[in-house]
Amino acid sequence: MDKIKRNLGFGCMRLPMIGEEVDIEQTKKMVDHFLEAGFNYFDTAHGYIDGKSELAIRECLTCRYPRDRYILTNKLSGNFFEREEDIRPLFESQLAACGVDYFDFYLMHAQGARNYGHYKACRAYETAFALKREGKVRHVGISFHDSPEMLDRILTDYPEIEAVQIQFNYLDFDDPAVQSHAVYEMARRHGKPVIIMEPVKGGRLVNLPDEAAAEFASLGGGSPASYAIRFAAGFEGVMMVLSGMSDMAQMTDNCSFMADFKPLDETERAAVDRVQAIFKTKNFIPCTACRYCTAGCPMGIAIPDIFATVNAKKLHRDWNSSYYYNIVCDKAGSRASDCVRCGQCEAVCPQHLEIRELLAAAAEEFEK
């Protein structure tokens, strides 16, 4: 782990896009800026952007820089293997897609009670540890979305795990559904370095309600993202904070305040506390737009986009939200009311949202 430079990672789940394709030229410029600023940690997964993230990594990073210039993390996602025998071919395809012959970190993806049994039955952890012994993986870890008790079970079963990636931000800090603080404490209890994902909660801690934005503006400098990311990075044992940067402006902003990282001071932390309190009054749907729910939806419902219009309606109370609801649904070719309540979306949602009920409420709000 001594090759890691600084504690900001480039999360490659939300790369810049041109229509349905990754904007390769802008991504190359972002990769160049990131490395030139002294950072070197990149994070992807097989399913990100329908498989296009790994290919973009190869075209924008690994084909352009020597292997010792970067740290590359990939993940083993449960929906891409059914048996133990499927894992190695999948892994080799990931190496090929990314254009490398080893991964610095290989994480068991989105671990929790819903899928841990599948990984156990398929001996996924044992396979990953074998890949490490063979030199194809440098470090084995997990990304995690569940309770501290579930994390305790996994880390007790597999003490060889070397790092834990968790969702952690000031909005989820004491949220009873996410329990990010308690999960962080459990990882530290087991002595594991922590990697942070969703520090700005899918952009929700960047696009703030007006009164929340005013709290940070009163500090006299710094973007909303800077306070969110520095909040997460300031905890003991945090090895890395991932940011899913999707344009050059986000890249330059994040690099600017993380190049000479300073934890939040008391005044800044008090402002974060006030912003957190403001959010609690809004009753927003806590969707991070990871889009795991859309891949298997039989009706092709644009669930995260519909939830974004619901949240916008709660925030602005104007006609624009209804207008954009229709645009979102026309583009997807389906509406919230088309939900057949199969539950596929809820089975894979890292936020454990009651998506079927939320879609029904959206239909009632926008399809009167």
Image (cartoon, rainbow, N blue to C red):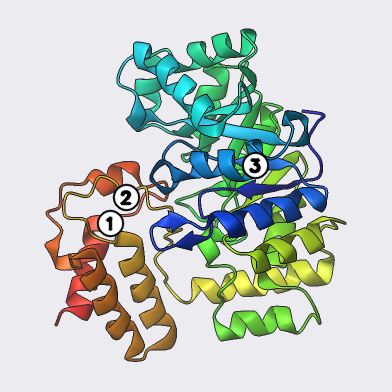
Closest to the camera, between mark 2 and mark 1, is: 2
Name the image quarter holding residue 42.
Answer: top right
* Disc 2 residue type (three-letter): Cys
* Disc 1 residue type (three-letter): Ile
Callout 1 crowding tier (Cα within 10 Å): few <14, some 14–19, many ≥20: many
In which quadrant of the rendered image does the C terminus lie?
bottom left
Where does label 1 land, which residue? Answer: 355
Under circle 3, the secondary element is: helix
Q: Is residue 330 left or right of residue 49?
A: left
Label disc, if present, on residue 61 of the rendered structure: 3
Considering only vertical position in the picture, is 159 above or below 270? above
Closest to the camera, between mark 2 and mark 3, is: 3
Name the image quarter holding residue 30.
Answer: bottom right
Residue 235: percent from the left, percent from the top? 75, 48
Residue 307: percent from the left, percent from the top? 34, 67
Where does label 2 land, which residue? Answer: 293
Callout 3 crowding tier (Cα within 10 Å): few <14, some 14–19, many ≥20: many
Closest to the camera, between mark 3 and mark 1, is: 3
Under circle 1, the secondary element is: helix
